[in-house]
Amino acid sequence: MITIAEIQQHVADAMGISIIDMHVKDRHLRVARPRQVAMYFSRELTGHSYPEIGRRFGNRDHTTILAGVAKVKWLMKQWPDFAAQVESIREGLGQ
């Protein structure tokens, strides 16, 4: 089973941010969007709860994780290019 740390590292590499950015409070889109994608995969590919995922992303509240996952799902429906990027990252994770 893949770990949250592995997901964070892979998404950070694929989307051009540092692993540190996964944990900081920065809300700029260039950091927030990859972090949301990592949250999405953490929920989809691991058995961890929203609170546990939140702890692994800079001690965020579980509602932040819930909102991030929902945002990624919504964006994938709205933007085919974004959906293709997310699916490409999923393939890189071996899922």
Image (cartoon, rainbow, N blue to C red):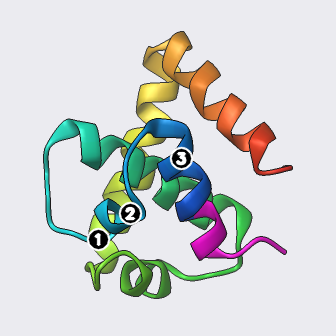
Residue tagged by mark 2? Answer: 66
Question: Which segment is the magenta one?
Answer: 1-7
Give above or below for 93 relative to 15: below
Secondary structure of the residue carrying numbered label 2: helix
Q: CA distance from mark 2 to mark 3?
A: 23 Å
Residue tagged by mark 3? Answer: 13
Q: Left or right: where does residue 65 sit relative to residue 37?
A: left
Q: Could you say which is closer to the camera, residue 80 or residue 17?
A: 17
Mark 2 closeness class: few <14, some 14–19, many ≥20 residues within 10 Å: some
Residue 62's spot in the image, x, y percent?
A: 34, 78
Secondary structure of the residue carrying numbered label 1: helix
Give above or below for 54 relative to 24: below
Is disc 2 in contact with disc 1, using a CB cutoff of under 8 Å?
yes
Is disc 3 in contact with disc 1, using a CB cutoff of under 8 Å?
no
Q: Could you say which is closer to the camera, residue 47 or residue 4?
A: 4
Amino acid type, mark 2 = Leu
Mark 3 closeness class: few <14, some 14–19, many ≥20 residues within 10 Å: some
The verdict on residue 3 being magenta is yes
Image quadrant where one finds the N terminus: bottom right
Res 41 quadrant in image = bottom right
Residue 64's spot in the image, x, y percent?
A: 27, 66
Q: CA distance from mark 3 to mark 1?
A: 26 Å
Mark 1 closeness class: few <14, some 14–19, many ≥20 residues within 10 Å: few
Residue 44's spot in the image, x, y percent?
A: 66, 59
Q: Could you say which is closer to the camera, residue 31 or residue 77?
A: 31
Amino acid type, mark 1 = Thr
Point 56% across, 39% down: residue: 14
